[in-house]
Image: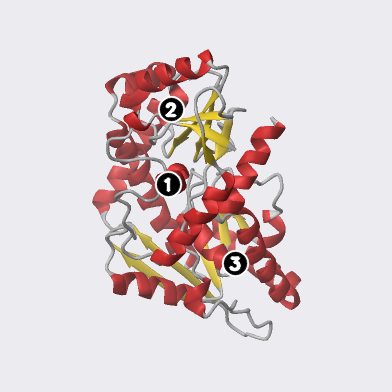
């Protein structure tokens, strides 16, 4: 696929989709395997090529979308229309749903099944492939185990009374913000970070904590749970990152609580290891779910039925324990086929051609 992007728009940040063409300017990851990153971007260069406005297949907006960039994006869209081209836009938030964006823009973002326009596609990240940390071998779950282990690392504070009242407050804000006039007000004041903090982060933290409490009431499993005060980021200490990876490798079933968006680094790390996740279904739209039979691979627990999580796990184990190795290998193969940079770019290009 040939793409064009206006380099003059890039001042600091740029989308990872273009990194193979930019060749990692000012790009630093503290906890990833640098060789793996460089190999990844070499693969990316096999599938996308830099072109001009006239000969390209698509314009690409070179920065992650934010509310304050709305006018710039509209101008970019207008410029693309002069050449009869469409724009590919990447975004990590949700309130761009409240903005009228031209029909020549294709959006890649985290989204839900409840609100997913036809011109919108799921955006998976490109996290580190963790299998090299385990000597490039999948740790297969033994069907003879009497007690299986569940892994989860999260950050939340659910024991505090203050957090409970914060939760009630933000749930009210969340409901009110769904009213159309409030949506446009949020767009106009352009306080995206404030919205995300109030409406999403506080709600996630409290509800994640409540789910963990519910899950830990079960007695059949070993819980390799780690609670942290903040999320794992590029600034996370190396020893914390290694603890995270080692706990994941040495556990049977990783727990995935995505809340309302489909963007989860943890999911793809888990899949890279060939692990079978316990996926809490909170109506997130998963990438390529029309092609990948997630329901055959993951232990899927509806959010509304979280109190019965033990039954879902037991049923899955009873049905599949003699097929664990095949399922785990299938998950690893799907990771390689869909979620490496080269394979994901290839899938994007194929889906765009079909449309």
Please name which of the two marks, 1 or 2, marks the residue nearer to the observer: 1
- The disc label shown at residue 47, or none: none
Q: Residues within 10 Å of mark 1 (few under 14, many from 20)?
A: some
Residue 129 image offset from top left, x and y in percent:
50, 65
Q: Residues within 10 Å of mark 2 (few under 14, many from 20)?
A: some
**Residue 182 visible in the snapshot:** no
Q: Residue at x 44, y 34 (%)?
A: 94
Q: Residue at x 35, y 69 (%)?
A: 241
* Relative side of 198 to 353, left or right: left
Q: Return the residue at label 3.
A: 310
CA–CA distance in space, label 3 to label 1:
43 Å
Q: Image quadrant of residue 22? A: top left
**Residue 1 visible in the snapshot:** yes
Q: Quadrant of the C terminus?
A: top right
Q: Residue at x 69, y 76 (%)?
A: 325
Q: Residues within 10 Å of mark 3 (few under 14, many from 20)?
A: some
Q: Return the residue at label 2.
A: 96
CA–CA distance in space, label 3 to label 2:
38 Å
* Relative side of 195 to 110, left or right: left
The relative height of residue 131 versus residue 277 in the rendered view (above or below) is below
Element class at badge 2? helix
The tag earlier along the polypeptide, 3 or 1, is: 1
Mark 1 and mark 2 residues within 8 Å of each other at the beta carbon? no
């Amino acid at each position: 696929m040939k793409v064009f992007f206006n380099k003059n728009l890039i001042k600091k940040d740029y989308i990872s989709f273009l990194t193979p063409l930019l060749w990692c300017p000012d790009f630093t990851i503290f906890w990833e395997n640098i060789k793996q990153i460089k190999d990844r971007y070499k693969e990316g260069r096999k599938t996308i090529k830099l072109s001009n406005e006239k000969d390209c297949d698509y314009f690409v907006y070179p920065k992650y979308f934010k509310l304050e960039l709305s006018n710039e994006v509209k101008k970019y869209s207008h410029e693309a229309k002069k050449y009869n081209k469409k724009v590919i836009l990447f975004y990590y938030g949700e309130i761009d749903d409240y903005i009228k964006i031209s029909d020549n823009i294709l959006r890649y973002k985290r989204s839900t099944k409840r609100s997913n326009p036809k011109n919108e596609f799921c955006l998976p990240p490109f996290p580190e492939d963790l299998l090299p940390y385990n000597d490039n071998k999948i740790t297969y779950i033994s069907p003879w185990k009497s007690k299986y282990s569940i892994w989860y690392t999260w950050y939340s504070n659910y024991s505090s009374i203050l957090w409970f009242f914060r939760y009630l407050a933000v749930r009210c804000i969340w409901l009110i913000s769904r009213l159309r006039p409030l949506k446009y007000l949020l767009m106009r004041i352009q306080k995206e970070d404030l919205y995300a903090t109030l409406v999403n982060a506080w709600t996630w933290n409290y509800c994640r904590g409540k789910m963990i409490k519910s899950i830990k009431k079960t007695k059949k499993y070993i819980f390799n749970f780690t609670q942290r005060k903040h999320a794992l980021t590029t600034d996370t200490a190396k020893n914390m990152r290694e603890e995270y990876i080692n706990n994941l490798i040495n556990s049977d079933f990783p727990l995935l609580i995505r809340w309302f968006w489909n963007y989860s680094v943890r999911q793809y790390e888990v899949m890279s290891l060939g692990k079978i996740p316990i996926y809490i279904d909170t109506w997130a739209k998963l990438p390529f779910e029309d092609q990948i039979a997630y329901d055959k691979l993951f232990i899927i627990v509806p959010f509304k039925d979280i109190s019965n999580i033990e039954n879902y796990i037991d049923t899955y184990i009873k049905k599949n324990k003699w097929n664990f190795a095949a399922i785990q290998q299938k998950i690893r193969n799907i990771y390689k086929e869909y979620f490496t940079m080269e394979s994901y770019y290839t899938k994007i290009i194929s889906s765009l051609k079909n449309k």
